[in-house]
Amino acid sequence: MKNVIEQGEIAKLRSDSGVGGISGEMHLVRHDGKKYALRICLDEKRAEDYSALYYNMEKHGFFPKLLYREGKHFLFEFIEGRDCTLKDGPEIAYEVGKIFALVNSIPTDNLKTLNADKKFFSDLDFLLKQGIIDNEKHEEIKQLHEALRGKADLKMAAEISDCIPSNFRISNGKVFLVDIEAIRYRFKGRGIAKAFLRWFKKNEERTKFIEGYSSVAPVDFLTESHLKFSYLYYLVINTRFKLETKKTYSENLKQLDLLLKGKLN
């Protein structure tokens, strides 16, 4: 398969909507009438991390098959079909829930303990200094964090931290996770919080997601308090990220207000 990389026509791989990945690592290769997905990792450490993740996922069949690897180059099968959309939520929430559980089950040996509080308060203070929130809101968020923190079980896990439709594809009725970059080691539940706030917003979708998850692994960690803490953490961290990357964060602030009022589902 080395000749596919050496002789093929290589271009940036883009989603169905025409957007390329943030890292710029993914490419589309055309060779001898066939298409392939090529990831060129930024460095060897990243390549080894992705290799370990892939071989932990391979047996489950929800990720594209790795056809060839040399150093920082990974050649995967190209998944024909289409990207998922927000409208697919009711039909695929169960399958995405199963995939979440399988990713959560990836071994996390020898990982450092996550200092979630340090990151959270650093970003919260940043939002205050930038005038995104005022002193009163800053204090309300701190108080809610304190009320929820002791009830949240922040175990480290492999998480799909970027659960957005374009990171999944449907091919012949099967759902695939196609972006390995979406997997990060975070506290368990953080990725689900984003999935619920950004994609599976309806109770019907969330119920199916939980049913899919629980078909693979227990979901008793996801208590109401843990989910609310995960919402709070995600909204603060993501608001800073969007501010720094010049993306709109107005929806985050609206959801944060609802959370503080106890009205965010």
Image: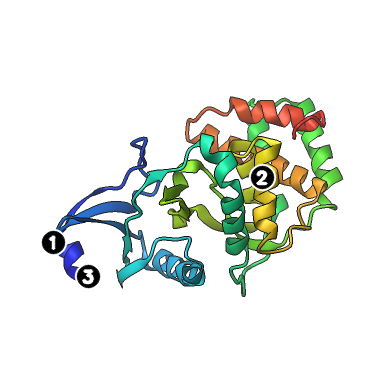
Who's the residue at 36% across and 63% down the image? 43
Q: Amino acid at mark 2?
A: Ala
Q: SS class of the residue under badge 1?
A: helix
Q: Along the polypeptide, which appears first: circle 1 or circle 2?
A: 1
Q: Amino acid at mark 1?
A: Gln
Q: Is residue 67 left or right of residue 233?
A: left
Q: Position of residue 137 (x, y in %)?
A: 76, 28
Distance from the alpha carbon under mark 1 to that under mark 3? 10 Å
Distance from the alpha carbon under mark 2 to that under mark 3? 39 Å
Tag shown at residue 57: none
Regarding residue 72, the answer to whether it shows in the image is yes
Tag shown at residue 1: 3
Who's the residue at 62% across and 39% down the image? 200
Distance from the alpha carbon under mark 1 to that under mark 2? 43 Å
Q: Position of residue 114 (x, y in %)?
A: 67, 60
Regarding residue 121, the answer to whether it shows in the image is no
Is residue 121 placed above or below 157 in the rendered structure? above
Q: Quadrant of residue 4?
A: bottom left
* Coloration of the structure image: rainbow
**Mark 2 — residue?**
193
Callout 2 environment at 10 Å: few (<14), some (14 to 19), or many (20+)?
many
Q: Amino acid at mark 3?
A: Met
**Of 47 and 5, the residue lying toward us:** 5
Tag shown at residue 7: 1
Of the two numbered discs 2 and 3 in the rendering, the one whose residue sits closer to the viewer:
3
Callout 3 environment at 10 Å: few (<14), some (14 to 19), or many (20+)?
few
Q: Along the polypeptide, which appears first: circle 1 or circle 3?
A: 3
Q: Position of residue 56 (x, y in %)?
A: 51, 71
Q: SS class of the residue under badge 3?
A: loop
Who's the residue at 45% across and 67% down the image? 54
Q: Position of residue 141 (x, y in %)?
A: 77, 35
